[in-house]
Amino acid sequence: MRLDLSERWQRNLIVCLFGSFTTVLGMTLMLPFLPLYVEQLGVSGHAAVVQWSGVAYSATFVMAGLVAPLWGRLGDRYGRKSMLLRASLSMTVCVSLMGLAANIWQLVGLRLLLGLASGYSSGATILVAVQTPKARSGQALGLLASGIMAGNLAGPLVGGALPPLIGIRATFWSASALILVAFVVTAWLVKEVPRSADAPVRKAVSWSQIPNKKPVLAMLVTGLMLMIANMSIEPIITVYVRTLVADPAHVTFTAGLVMSAAALGSVLSASRLGRLADRIGHVRVIAYALTAAALLLLPQAFVTASWQLIVLRFLMGLALGGLMPCITAVIRHNVPEHVVGATLGYSLSSQFAGQFTGPLIGGFVGGHIGMRAVFLATSGLLLVTALYARRAA
């Protein structure tokens, strides 16, 4: 029986939510056991293991950032569902082959291929943004963002729990099987609105094709600054927690709780903030959320106990949970239909750039000025970004 439009976009949203969760989980689950696997592949010495672990893990995200605009542009031309199928099937193969890697070079190469093949969650974001009614876009994108963040939260947890039970290589194969399920469900259930015969097809996105450039540029900058602010804290969390925890044996566990607290807050708030943005305006929610997060960063620089940091990071996650869906919605509402995918691809690239540069900046500031300075500088950065986003968009 033929689905009407409302049933179609809702079913697409559910499938994209599941597929985004599983593919992100597959990309992040190796974080807890990566150094152990690197050692199994023949790397010896603490410094070498740490160095190669960083190279292997970051390779995926660097490559994903570089190719995000390409996949967005191809999605505009050939359909978003085809991009979801390409990504999920390619990731199934790459993650499975990681369980067969014989040396570190093969692992790094496969991580690069995984970044090249990835793009399910970004493709799903574009499909949902394009096919959801504008009045419901904030809520839908917020729900999808919850699935993506849940994958980021669950990946390290699964990666920490499964290897002792089934082994590292079998953990890769289990994740691969889960992504394969996402491929099958996507192929079977996702129904994309057909492209009209007279819809223009462009080979590339020209800035002149976007009539209202100012808010689009503001959202690209906001996404970049948000990721820099988020990721600048990551390199110092464990070291900072060490100053708050008396028992050295509890440092790693407590640092994990601190990292997970922000992700959990974002999962809980993303859909609700999306609904709020649909009612009062996406730009207003972006400005308010950035300001709230900036204010919550200030006391984090002066906490005296680990539980205080955990609570503040959770509250910060609540504030930031709906930002990416709102950024996507603003871009989607200000660009023509035929360049939505490519423009959102550039938005994703700006976010990946923030994920890459944020830890570098945070590590430099923390090492040369002090860990508290990272929180204070990040707070100032978010306040400036909030003011810019509100005025420019």
Image (cartoon, rainbow, N blue to C red):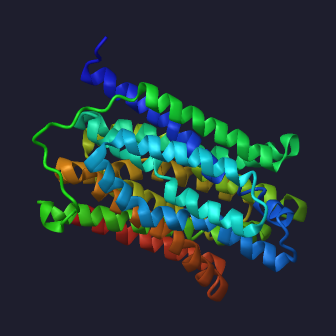
Q: Quadrant of residue 203?
A: bottom left
Q: Is residue 187 left or right of residue 170?
A: left
Point out residue 89 in the picture as x, y percentages from the top left corner.
Answer: 53, 43
- Above or below, comparing residue 220 to residue 120 in the picture: below
The residue sitting at the top extreme is: 1
Point out residue 29 in the picture as x, y percentages from the top left corner.
Answer: 68, 50
Name the residue located 32 percent from the left edge and 24 percent from the top edge.
8
* Residue 329 can be seen in this image: no
Q: Is residue 299 left or right of residue 165?
A: left
Point out residue 185 in the picture as x, y percentages from the top left corner.
Answer: 50, 28
Q: Is residue 331 left or right of residue 223?
A: left
Q: Considering depth in this image, is 275 or 4 the residue closer to the camera?
A: 4
Name the residue located 45 percent from the left edge and 25 percent from the top edge.
188
The residue sitting at the bottom extreme is: 368
Which quadrant: the C terminus? bottom left
- Above or below, comparing residue 167 to residue 213 in the picture: above
Q: How many numbered marks appear?
A: 0
Name the residue located 12 percent from the left edge and 66 percent from the top edge.
208
Q: Considering depth in this image, is 106 or 73 the residue closer to the camera?
A: 106
Name the residue located 41 percent from the left edge and 41 percent from the top edge.
142
Which quadrant: the N terminus? top left
* Residue 82 can be seen in this image: yes
Q: Quadrant of residue 245?
A: bottom right
- Above or below, comparing residue 378 to residue 366 in the picture: above
Point out residue 167 in the picture as x, y percentages from the top left corner.
Answer: 85, 46
